[in-house]
């Protein structure tokens, strides 16, 4: 089986008065069904790498194969098609349209593909909301939802076109600890269903919910290791609930 992602000596240089070499000679392979955290301090290149993986930016040189297809030299329109059909995005700030319902927000990516009927789009959007546990919130607007529910809508939107890959950029950055664990539980459940996930995070404890940690520094991959002592979200959520009960019962 071909890897979902194969990078071969990828570089990204931003030209200017002072050139910035944001990604340096990165080669890596991500197989179908992996759950990977990309970590590093500010300026390490992790966000630039995610932009390259999501076809939001183009490498200066090197090869990028997505599902076995070399997309390194594709034009802007072809890259847009790949973004819409093969990649789902989840952002720290949710990026939901405030004046539209949860259902309409989830339908949005399908409007750009124009390959499905309106009835089919609605059916897929409803199914995506059901997968993230929000089948009873389809008509709610973002301001009627909690932060965790808004992020679930964003995840459903990422699932709408049945992508090969979901990219999540600091998906728990705006959430409290308990809600963050709930979101990581959802990611773990989706990953167990075979979905490939790559997540940027600066939180070490959040990275422990994934299966593989890639650490970047100065544009290079400095560490690429499987996660040991991996956290299981259902167990961690139960531990947090028990701690809360103990505090409430304390004299």
Image (cartoon, helix red, strand yellow):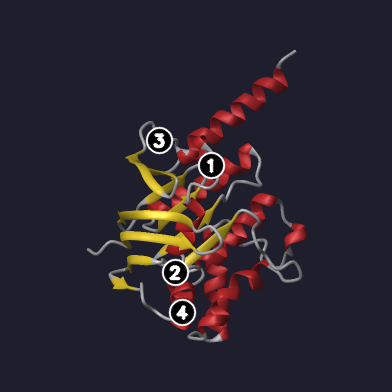
Residue 38 place in picture, x, y as percent: 44, 47
* Label pair 4/2, CB-CB below 8 angstroms: no
Q: Is residue 156 visible?
A: yes
Specify the label residue 36 is tagged with.
none
* Label pair 2/1, CB-CB below 8 angstroms: no
Which of pointers 4 and 2 indicates the residue nearer the eye? 2
Which residue is denoted by mark 1 in the rendering?
Answer: 202
Choose between 26 and 165: the one closer to the eye: 26
Q: Residues within 10 Å of mark 4 (few under 14, many from 20)?
A: some
Q: Residues within 10 Å of mark 1 (few under 14, many from 20)?
A: some
Label whose residue precedes the other's in the sequence (1 or 4): 4
At 24% from the left edge and 64% from the top edge, which residue is drawn?
2
User: Image height check: is 247 above or below 81?
Assistant: above
Label whose residue precedes the other's in the sequence (2 or 1): 2
Side of 119 where 250 appears, left or right? right
Which residue is denoted by mark 4 in the rendering?
Answer: 81
Residue 104 place in picture, x, y as percent: 65, 73
Dividing the image into 4 quarters, which one contains the N terminus?
Answer: bottom left
Which residue is denoted by mark 3 in the rendering?
Answer: 230
User: Image height check: is 75 above or below 135?
Assistant: below
Side of 182 where 81 appears, left or right? left
Specify the label residue 58 is tagged with.
2
Q: CA distance from mark 3 to mark 1?
A: 17 Å
Q: Residues within 10 Å of mark 3 (few under 14, many from 20)?
A: some
Residue 209 place in picture, x, y as percent: 45, 40
Label whose residue precedes the other's in the sequence (3 or 4): 4
* Label pair 1/4, CB-CB below 8 angstroms: no
Which of pointers 3 and 4 indicates the residue nearer the eye? 4
């Amino acid at each position: 089986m071909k890897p979902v992602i194969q990078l071969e000596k990828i570089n990204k240089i931003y030209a200017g008065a002072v050139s910035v070499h944001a990604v340096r000679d990165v080669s890596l392979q991500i197989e179908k069904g992996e759950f990977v955290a990309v970590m590093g301090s500010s300026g390490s290149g992790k966000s630039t790498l995610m932009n390259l993986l999501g076809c939001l930016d183009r490498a200066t040189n090197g090869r990028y194969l997505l599902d076995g297809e070399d997309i390194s030299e594709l034009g802007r329109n072809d890259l847009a098609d790949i973004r819409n059909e093969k990649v789902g995005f989840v952002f720290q700030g949710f990026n939901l349209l405030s004046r539209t319902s949860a259902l309409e927000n989830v339908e949005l990516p399908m409007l750009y593909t124009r390959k499905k009927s309106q009835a089919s789009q609605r059916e897929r959007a409803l199914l995506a909301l059901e997968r993230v546990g929000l089948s009873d919130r389809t008509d709610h607007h973002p301001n009627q939802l909690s932060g965790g529910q808004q992020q679930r809508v964003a995840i459903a939107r990422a699932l709408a076109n049945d992508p090969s890959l979901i990219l999540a950029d600091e998906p728990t950055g705006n959430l409290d600890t308990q809600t963050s664990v709930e979101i990581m539980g959802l990611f773990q459940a989706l990953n167990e269903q075979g979905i490939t996930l790559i997540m940027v995070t600066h939180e070490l404890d959040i990275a422990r919910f994934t299966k593989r940690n890639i650490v970047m520094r100065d544009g290079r991959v400095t560490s690429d290791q499987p996660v040991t002592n991996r956290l299981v979200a259902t167990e961690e959520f139960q531990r947090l609930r028990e701690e809360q009960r103990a505090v409430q019962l304390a004299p």
